[in-house]
Image: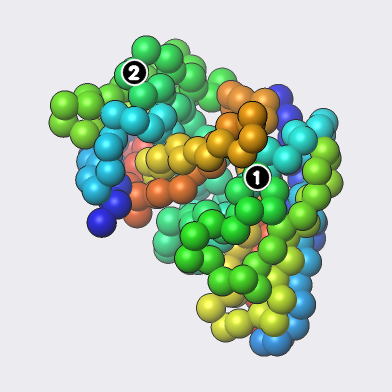
Amino acid sequence: DIQMTQSPSSLSASVGDRVTITCRASQSVTNYLNWYQQKPGKAPKLLIFAASNLQSGVPSRFSGSGSGTDFTLTINSLQPEDFATYYCQQSYFTPPETFGQGTKVEIK
Amino acid sequence: EVQLVESGGGLVQPGGSLRLSCAASGFTFSSYWMHWVRQVPGKGLVWVSRIKTDGTITSHAESVRGRFTISRDNGKNTLYLQMNSLRAEDTAVYYCARAGWLQLGSEYYYYMDVWGKGTTVTVSS
């Protein structure tokens, strides 16, 4: 099974900051990489699919990049509603559909 | 409105059984693969099972294989997860999710684009 490792596990940032979260796959997943946002007590929400494609309705301050084994989720100008946990997920070698362990973005 | 609504969670004793349901509305249910994903409170997302549009192909995570069975009734727009021989470690919030997809060039990309709010399963004596 492909393992997905996110870093950092958590970070503290201020409103207006630029935030970068990294996801690394244990082997190449080409660009079959998705990003989700989850707020406490809520279901996950799709942000980015196919590594860099913004899901409809997601603000343009979110962007994704990368291919192969290394991927990045960037949030430009962090907003109060962006404080949440973010997960990457590979959809290349399935099953299983594997998620990263999550990155919690907290208020500094 | 595109919507998924889970039900059927609750408290069950170890070794017991439970059937979760996921009612779909607002889209052509029979055209989409579907997933179950679970999450222990305070922990990460873990994929459980998936099923093809017509129900002919199913897959389960190794941790639930042989105990859980995913199925669907396209006539009722409903996804199911039959959970048998439940263990304490199955305690989690269970989400159903739609497998959205997009063709870009010659590639088909899959992602989980619609999620239910989840139903809580607690396995405890």
Is residue B46 positioned above or below B56 on the image?
Answer: below
Which amino acid type is shown beneath numbered disc 2?
Answer: Gly
The residue that appears at 75% across and 72% down in the rendered structure is A19
Q: Position of residue A63 (x, y in %)?
A: 69, 63
Q: Position of residue B101 (x, y in %)?
A: 50, 38
Which amino acid type is shown beneath numbered disc 1?
Answer: Ala
Q: Which mark is residue B55?
A: 2
The residue that appears at 60% across and 58% down in the rendered structure is A54
Mark 2 or mark 1, whichever is nearer to me = 1
Looking at the image, residue A33 sits to the left or right of residue B30; the answer is right
The residue that appears at 65% across and 67% down in the rendered structure is A62
- Given residues B26 and A44, the one toward you in this image is B26
Tag 2 subunit: B
**Residue B9 figure quarter:** top left
Tag 1 subunit: A
Q: Which mark is residue B74?
A: none
Q: Are marks 2 and 1 in contact (CB under 8 Å)?
A: no
- Given residues B112 and B63, the one toward you in this image is B112
Name the residue carrying label 1.
A50
Is disc 1 on the same chain as disc 2?
A: no
